[in-house]
Image: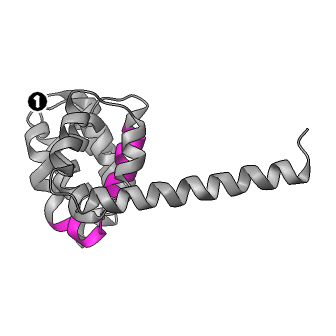
Amino acid sequence: MHSFNEINQLLTDCINLQDNLLDKLYLLANEPKTVKLLKTHLTQKFDPLLLHLIKQFPEAIKISLLPEIINIMQYLDGNTKLCQEVILSINTQWLEKHIWNYITPILGQQDYQTFGILMYLFNSFSQKLSKKLANLALQSDDKDVQEIGEFYLSNNRYLLDDV
C-alpha cells in the first residue's frame, strides 16, 4: 500500500501529465499539417489511443477526420465505441445536418453490422436520423438489414408520424 504522500505525488504527476498533454494538443491543433498526419496515422499506423487524443481536439479537426473515423467505426471491435465517442463529441446540430453525407459511402454495402452500428450511434443523438436509417434498412435486399429497420420502428411506433 502507498503512503498518503506517495498517492499525492502520483496525483500531482497525473495532473502535470494532463497539463502537458493539453499544451501539446493546443500546439498540434494550430499546426496546418496536423490533420494530414492524423489521417496517415488513422489509415496506416492506427493506434486506438489516437482516438482518445482526437476526442480532445477542436471540432474542426474532428470533422476533417470524420471519414477515417467512420471507416474505423464500421468494424465491430474495441474501437467502435471510441469512434462513436469521438463522433458524439461533435456538435449535435452539426451532426444532424451533415453526418448523413459522411455515412452514405458505407451504406451501399447493405451490411447488417454497419446498419446496426449506425443505428446505435444515431439513437444517441437523433430520432430523425434513426428513423431515416430504419426506413432505408426496410428497403434493403438483405433480410437481416430489414430486421434492423423493423425492430427500430416497432419499438418506436410513436415516431412513425412525428419525425
Give the image quarter of residue 147: top left
Res. 154 visible in picture: no
Choose between 69 and 109: the one closer to the eye. 69
Residue located at (76% from left, 53% from top)? 9
Res. 45 visible in picture: yes
Residue 83 in the figure: left or right of residue 97: right
The main secondary structure of the magenta stretch is: helix
Choose between 109 and 56: the one closer to the eye. 56
- Label 1 crowding class (10 Å Cα cut-off): few <14, some 14-19, many 20+? few
Give above or below for 35 relative to 40: below
Residue 141 in the figure: left or right of residue 41: left
Give above or below for 127 relative to 114: below
Residue 81 rendering spot, x and y as whole percentages: 42, 42
Give the image quarter of residue 36: top left
Residue marked by disc 1: 141
Residue 78 in the figure: left or right of residue 142: right
Give above or below for 97 relative to 137: below
Quadrant where the C terminus sits is bottom left
Quadrant where the N terminus sits is top right
Residue 86 rendering spot, x and y as whole percentages: 35, 52
Give the image quarter of residue 123: bottom left
Residue 160 rendering spot, x and y as whole percentages: 25, 63
Q: Secondary structure at mark 1?
A: loop
Q: Please state the extent of the stretch shown in magenta in the rendering.
A: 80-97
- Is residue 86 one of those drawn in magenta? yes
Residue 49 in the figure: left or right of residue 160: right
- Is residue 64 one of those drawn in magenta? no
Residue 135 rendering spot, x and y as whole percentages: 17, 50
Which kind of residue does numbered mark 1 sit on? Asp
Residue located at (40% from left, 51% from top)? 85
Give above or below for 70 relative to 8: above
